[in-house]
Image (cartoon, coloured by chain):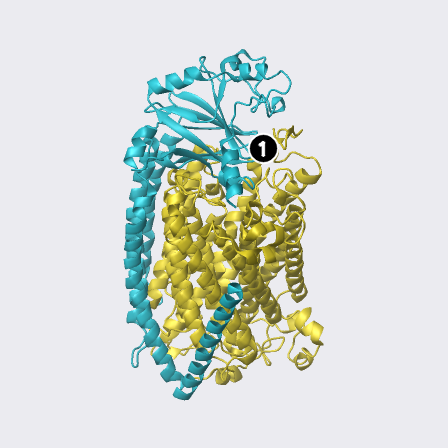
Amino acid sequence: MSNEATLHSQQEVMHGAAAHGHGHDDHEHHHEGGFISKYVFSMDHKTIAKQFLITGILWAIVGAFFSVLFRLQLGFPDTTFPWLESILGHWAKGGHISPEAYYALVTMHGTILVFFVLTAGLSGTFSNLLIPLQVGARDMASPFMNMLSYWFFFMASCVMMCSLFVQTGPASGGWTSYPPLSALGDASIGSKIGMDLWLTSMALFVVSQLLGGLNYISTILNMRTKGMSMTKMPLTIWSFFFTAVLGVLSFPVLLSGFILLLFDRHAGTSFYLSELFVAGKALSNEGGSAILYQHLFWFLGHPEVYIIILPAMGMVSEVMAVNARKPIFGYLAMVGSMFAIAILAFLVWAHHMFVTGLNPFLGAFFVLLTLLIAVPSAIKVFNWITTIWRGNIRFTPGMLFSIGFVSTFISGGLTGIWLGNSSIDIHLHDTYFVIAHFHIVMGVSAFLGLFAGVYHWFPKMFGRYLNNTLSYIHFWITLVGAYLIFWPMHYEGMAGMPRRYYDYSNWESFKQFGDLNHFISIVVIIVFAAQLLFVFNFFYSVFKGRKLTTTNPWNATTLEWTTPINPGHGNWPGEIPEVYRWPYDYSKDGVDFIPQTVPLSKDEEAAGGH
Amino acid sequence: MSGYLAVLVVVLIFIVIFQIAKASEYVSILKGEKKSRQQSNRVNGFLMISFLVLGLIGVYYCNDLLRGKMGSGAASEQGEGIDSMIMWTLVITGIVFVITQILLFWFAFKYQEKEGRKAFYFPHNNKLELIWTVIPAIALTVLVAIGLRHWFRITSEAPKDAMVVEITGKQFNWLIRYPGKDGQLGRKFFKNINEATNPVGQDWDDELNKDDYMATEMHLVVNKPVKLIIGSRDVIHDVGLSHFRLKMDAVPGIPTTLWFTPKYTTAEMKIKNDNPDFMYEISCDQMCGAGHYSMKANIVVETQAEYDAWSAKQKTQFALAHESAAPAAPATPVADSTQKAVAVNVVKH
């Protein structure tokens, strides 16, 4: 049953189109704007998605390259690299990264990857691309706000990029920027102008997230095509929905924390400062609480990790179902567990603060709530595994990355059970165990989910395929490399080896891991090279990749594959298709797949949500 | 020169990989989409199962290789509780890890696309979902219960007979103050701080301060509980006690505490770890600036007799401050161990 046939068989009333002025009469003329309005200040959600993706890729290269630089220091503390001096100047005198530069690199690595790549680059790209396409809308609720969302992100990027080049260097107090370190220029060189730029950039970033998030929510709630009830939405849309809600509710809190920090820095207030003696003199600040900032920060900071991982979960669910040729197992349980995760995300922030002197009684509640998150996470994992059970699996690159995602999500999720338990956290807090845990569960997993999404929807974005062989090489090096890098770090952490150290060679307790650090750094360089292979594959295929010959290359059921190969602004040249069934009718009654646009036959029972 | 060569080699490797990738794409077009998909399916299916097998062997090998480097286990009573807690958690999460990874990769391998295979339409099953909601919930309840028991024990009030030591973080070393004979620490105020004579800002009007002394190393008595009063002069630091399995933030303006009972003397640990250089080290575990990595102080755990002998030799800070009140007296009792560490680094680089 071809999709063209089903598309043309649609005889439904015009729905949604008139509401925002993209009725199909004026559609033919719609995207005849000039280069600027088509590619730069575009209001087409698909173009904005590509802008987010490409900006994200560029930032990912920068962020990952920074990790290569500081891994050189950790893996080869006694070697000099003269070329470092040529690119970093006095930050790497004699070919050796200085401690100040090391901490700046670490801080920027975290900031860039958490916010600019895995938040903007991941949910920015795929929420924009998939929400209108999969719910059956011609564009976002407010295409203009959507455009602003990207350009605020662009401005945030510019400011952050500038901060890398100022005399005193960028922020260097860690991506969490705890005061007083981040509040006092005398305490750290990175807390001078670099920190102001960091805060400005992050404020712009929050604006971008809010503009985007409000759009995603209103589009999903109001602009679904006829028949697309909430329970007929693909899990991708559910995940973007919860992600946007988390962002809208928590980013403003982060912004408030940043504004207080700015006041402390420049207006002489004492929100976070008390009883300080810095650079040879006592400061006048009294009565503030440095811990207050941590509460404000982690009230976003913890939901933030779910903002990163939920879209990946949604995309992986979709890609797995398509390529296993089976419905996702337990659709409602998947939605329910995402809902539970979204609620619990707001109730666990203080588990980042077990050793700040937090009231132990209060800590007990955070232990309970934190470990509770493992239940919906476990449900999701078992449901994914059951989804591939007795499937007929096609190992497309998207599918490989999805399986990789489940594997790393299990590995990193299980160590979360260690760290969420406060008594273990007293020992493992701020050690390499934490590095291993969050890199596997939200760094590597989110990247694998992101790659699954890119490989799966690249044909929709550009009307071409990525090269398969390069994709397979990319996948296997990334998965194996990620485990080789982060698995041994658990052992360093259990020995108590602290994170964010420039050099361990003077520590009797930690210097035995020198060889291991050396090994890890070598793997980091190889994995980084493999990512460059992907970047090359991406840009090459945008222009030269094998062209699509069918609108539905993966034989999927969802609406985005009912659009033309290169859809214009407005997505569907004719009417928006109507939806009759849930998105996971794969292998039902012996039929390989039944698109959502096909009406139920007479004696057929609807599956999934009703 | 060798740098350029390395870049050239990498670029060449890239080009070779790319050419192969392109050629294989042409071949797959020639072969037909279906056939090439079947072939790549077989290859990746095989890699899936190989990854599982090699990965599990790797996990075992890695453990074999690194287990010995983690030291001889906890050196405090509280730490032993944490170690046993880790053991329980490791067993439970380890079982789940092995089972789920085996299922994941085994299913991926077993149910790869085959001619004639039909996927099984299996949208949901309430019983199964109930099982894997309830079992994790029970396992987690057990872990929470054991964990909180340790947590409350560790964070409980220190025993009355515990010795008291104050430790204050500053960029980038630790200031250690003992209460002296009276067992009570004197008042301090941050505006009294004087780098040379009064590093923590003791108030000399307070009689309790007269016998307090500062130390460059923390001396503790084996099997005697110790309560640390933790503070900071500038930014947030963290007293990291890896061998005792404990840590606590040092927050400016908000004192925190931590108590524990060391179980082995430094001398015993040297034998236990088979390392004559073994030293209990306090590491700073909260990012505190450019010298964070060098913020170290040593702990010496010793017998009561050794401790008493050491303690008797210490000069009170009050005395030091007042004899060095004479102009240009350089005597600063807090010899800066970390400055030395930094210096070593600077020289080395």
The location of residue B97, given as percent across then percent down, is 31, 55
* Chain (yellow): A
| Residue A588 or residue A549, whichever sits in front | A549
Residue lying at the far top of the rendered structure:
B207
- Going 50% across and 47% down the picture, which residue do you hit? A346
**Left or right of A573, for residue B180:** left
Q: Is residue B98 visible?
A: yes
A145, above or below B187, in the image: below
Residue lying at the far bottom of the rendered structure:
B30
The hue of chain B in the figure is cyan
The location of residue B117, given as percent across then percent down, is 29, 78
- The part of the image, by quadrant, that contains residue A424 is top left
Position of the N terminus of chain A, as image quadrant, is bottom left
Q: Dot 1 lies on which element?
A: loop
The crowding category of the residue bearing disc 1, from other C-alpha atoms within 10 Å (few below 14, some 14 to 19, many at least 20), is: many
Position of the C terminus of chain A, as image quadrant, is bottom left
Residue identified by numbered label 1 = B234
